[in-house]
Amino acid sequence: MNDDAGIESVLREDRVFPPPAGFSESVGGAWIASMADYESRYRRSIDDPESFWGEAAREYRWMKPFTTVLEWNCPDARWFADGTLNLCDNCVDRHVDEGHGDDTAIIWEGEPVGADGPEVLRLSYRDLQRETAKFGNALKALGVGKGDIVTIYMGMVPEVAIAMLACARIGAAHSVIFGGFSASAIVDRVNDADSKVILTCDGAWRRGSVVPLKANVDEACAKLPDVEHVVMLERCGNDVELTEGRDHDWATLVSTQSEDCPCEEMAAEDLLFLLYTSGSTGKPKGIVHTTAGYLVHAALTAKNTFNLRPGRDHVYWCTADVGWITGHSYILYGILPNRVPCLMYEGAPNAPDEARFWDIVERHRVTHFYTAPTAIRAFMKWGDAHPAKHDLSSLKVLGTVGEPINPEAWIWYHEVIGGERCPIVDTWWQTETGGHMITPQPAATPTVPGSCTLPALGIDAAIVDDDGNELPNGRGGLLVIRKPWPSMLRGIHGDRDRYVETYWSRVEGMYTAGDAANRDDRGYFWIMGRIDDVINVSGHRLGTMEVESALVSHPDVVEAAVVGFPHEIKGTGIAAFVTLASGVEAHDELKSTLRAHTGHEIGAIAKPDMIRFTNALPKTRSGKIMRRLLRDIAAGRDSDQDTTTLEDLSVLAKLRDDED
Ligand code: PRX
């Protein structure tokens, strides 16, 4: 397996943390009240999935009720296939119709802090209904219709939520690109999705400076002749150019639209969105999610994992960006149907200072807080004084996602942020799974730092060998899901073979997640890391080949090998071993150039933390790069101490080869 994942833990932590006393009362009652409750519901969900999922799906508003729950022809699933509904209707209009139009749906806070404090906006369900209707009509005016794919490349502004929901409202699909990705990354994704419309902002606030989103779109559009419309929201007041005939000012476009835009009736299996993620090859893949099944599992897991209850003064905050699956499922589509106010924050955790998040928790009385281990490690490093300055007593549930959490970070989160009174839900899932797969239930599951514990209801997770045989507890193996679930990906956009090969061919009849895992003697799952060439940098998924392709696209580079290494904050850092073209001299400046080049090709998250120049890459006799050896080398050195000296790693490889 790929041993890149996770920082090494110095703390062994065997303590078990039962759900804190008084927790259920503090959240107005628990959906899953005890382990016995969980176990009996789980058993039923696995023994009779159709009745379990059918019941779960009937919680939502259907235009035409479904009569079949599942058609399963591995690896193709059709859930609730003859039913029709609309996701925006379930997130927004339904609440208005049921008398909750004035309740708060979204609380938004901007990054800049002026003399009067930060800008804060509250959007009710009625506001969202009006704004998604107007923006839906704006999209229609640009020719967008059912089935078209709209690309969204925006900052964390309220309009990004409005735009996504408006697409769902009119039956268009969206493809959101994280604002940290570069122009080249936009080109690849827009081409793959065949998108004719891009929604963007002039810029996005990030730690006091402006990320030039519109300029990146302009650079991308120079290579995208088929893009017909770019709609730009003005947020930062930075200098931008509007191209006549192609570009539209958001506010002007919306101002003339009618508020009448009924939610389109969608078939359960209609495309809802594409979201690109990294895999083992150089090309990111467009993960396909469809309408009803995605809604059902995202909303059910949001309800159970965070124990969300409407009308209980909950304020839920997920710190992810909507450009990732966490933002799709647990800022918008899973949260809004639960009718709990959701906080969206625009900027960085250390703007204007390192206490910003705790200031937000205090001012908005946040009850549910969901973040990534990499952020928790940064908070730890910044010191306890920052959270100590703020009243965090409103917090009730803490969540983590994206990468394994090391016990030190877990304990710190529990003690310093949660005041030892908040259950921690360590949620394991993926872009492909759409929603939580393995996670504690906050009022029921005793937690152990570092373990994501047990499968969510309806999820048949197991650890198996290559032949699909379940392994006994204590033996690591492949993490698989043996039964289909409603929010599973339906494919990779435009690449059927890759879908089958990546997820369904390693073990027959089972979904292979790409992670290795282990179970302890309680049956709890422990994620060990990826089994493919994917690394998890600050909770963001990157393919080592993507970074390698970016590096070799520089004229000075002939070959590059990229591996992960343990990194104190990021979990995994990126190490690049680079062979230079003949005659090119190795020097520190070239490292900076190559880092910038990678940033330009992919985005800042892909910039190597360590670059080593080498005369030759170590290879086996059959010509495969010896990544294991490179990982060992990368792990043994500090990123600051790397030298520019060209070294001959093939010598080391020979030694290693002789040992084998
Ligand atoms: O390796 C697992 C890791 O993140 C991968 C999925 O990445 P992505 O599709 O970008 O989705 C991230 C947000 C859901 C997984 O294959 N991962 C995710 N959550 C955890 C995790 N590893 C350990 N513990 C987790 N809780």
Image: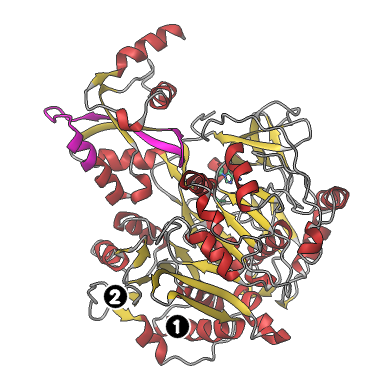
Let me know if residue 288 appears in the view: no
**Mark earlier in primary sequence (1, 2):** 1
The spot of residue 450 in percent (x, y) is 64, 38
| 174 up-or-down from 660: above or below | below
| Quarter occupied by residue 30 | bottom right
Residue furthest to the left: 583
Q: Mark 2 falls on what kind of element? A: loop
> As displayed, is residue 361 above or below residue 125?
above
Residue at coordinates 39% horizontally, 61% vertically from top-left? Answer: 179
Q: Which residue is mark 2?
A: 237
Q: Cβ–Cβ below 8 Å for labels 1 and 2?
A: no
Which circle, 1 or 2, is nearer the viewer?
2
**In magenta stretch: residue 576:** yes
Marks 1 and 2, how far apart in space?
27 Å
Q: Which residues are magenta?
A: 564-593
- Please provide percent x and percent y for residue 618: 34, 20
The amino acid pointed to by label 1 is: Lys
How crowded is the residue under tag 1: few (<14 C-alpha within 10 Å), some, or many (20+)? some
Q: Which mark is residue 140?
A: 1
Task: Give the x, y percent position of residue 330.
Answer: 60, 61
Question: Dot 1 lies on which element?
Answer: helix
